[in-house]
Image: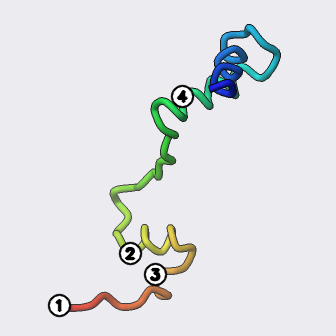
């Protein structure tokens, strides 16, 4: 509880410290951390996207299973 009060005091400017960092800590604990986003071009096929995420070429991916 004491740590939370100190972070709030810093965020409000009532105590020395990095107020932006303190506010971010409060937001992360209250609302959850922001998830990273991935920009996807709809003109690229799924195998190219998967290869890009894995850091390989499309030719390096195993062939798909035909169920």
Front position among marks 4 and 2: 4
- List the single residue furthest toward the left: 67
The vertical placement of 61 against 9, above or below, is below
Disc 1 marks which residue?
A: 67
Alpha-carbon distance for marks 3 and 4? 40 Å
The first of marks 4 and 2 along the sequence is 4
Residue corresponding to mark 2: 47
Circle 2 packing at 10 Å, graded few (<14), some (14-19), many (20+), is some
How dense is the environment of label 3, judged by Cα within 10 Å: few (below 14), some, or many (20 and up)? some
Dot 3 or dot 4, earlier in sequence: 4
For residue 27, the mark is: 4
Q: Quadrant of the N terminus?
A: top right
Front label number (1 vs 3): 1
Q: Residue at x 44, y 86 (%)?
A: 61
Query: What is the x, y in percent for residue 52?
Result: 51, 69
| Disc on the earlier residue, 1 or 3 | 3
User: Which x, y percent locates residue 6?
Assistant: 71, 21
3 and 2 marks in contact (CB < 8 Å): yes
Q: Nearer the viewer, mark 1 or mark 2?
A: 1
Q: Under tag 2, what secondary structure? A: helix
Nearer-N-terminus badge (3/2): 2
Q: Tags 1 and 2 in contact by the CB under 8 Å rule?
A: no
Q: CA distance from mark 1 to mark 3?
A: 21 Å
Q: Say which of marks 3 and 4 sits in front.
A: 4
Q: Earlier in the sequence, mark 1 or mark 4?
A: 4
Q: Which residue is mark 3?
A: 58
**Dot 4: few (<14), some (14–19), or many (≥20) neighbours within 10 Å?**
few
Please report the residue visible at 61 percent of the width from the left and 29 percent of the height from the top: 24
Q: Position of residue 38 (x, y in %)?
A: 47, 52
């Amino acid at each position: 509880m004491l740590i939370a009060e100190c972070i709030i005091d810093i965020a409000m400017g009532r105590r020395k410290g990095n107020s932006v960092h303190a506010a971010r800590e409060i937001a992360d604990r209250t609302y959850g951390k922001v998830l990273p986003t991935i920009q996807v071009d709809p003109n690229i096929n799924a195998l190219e996207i998967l290869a890009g995420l894995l850091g390989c070429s499309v030719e390096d991916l195993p062939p798909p299973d035909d169920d």
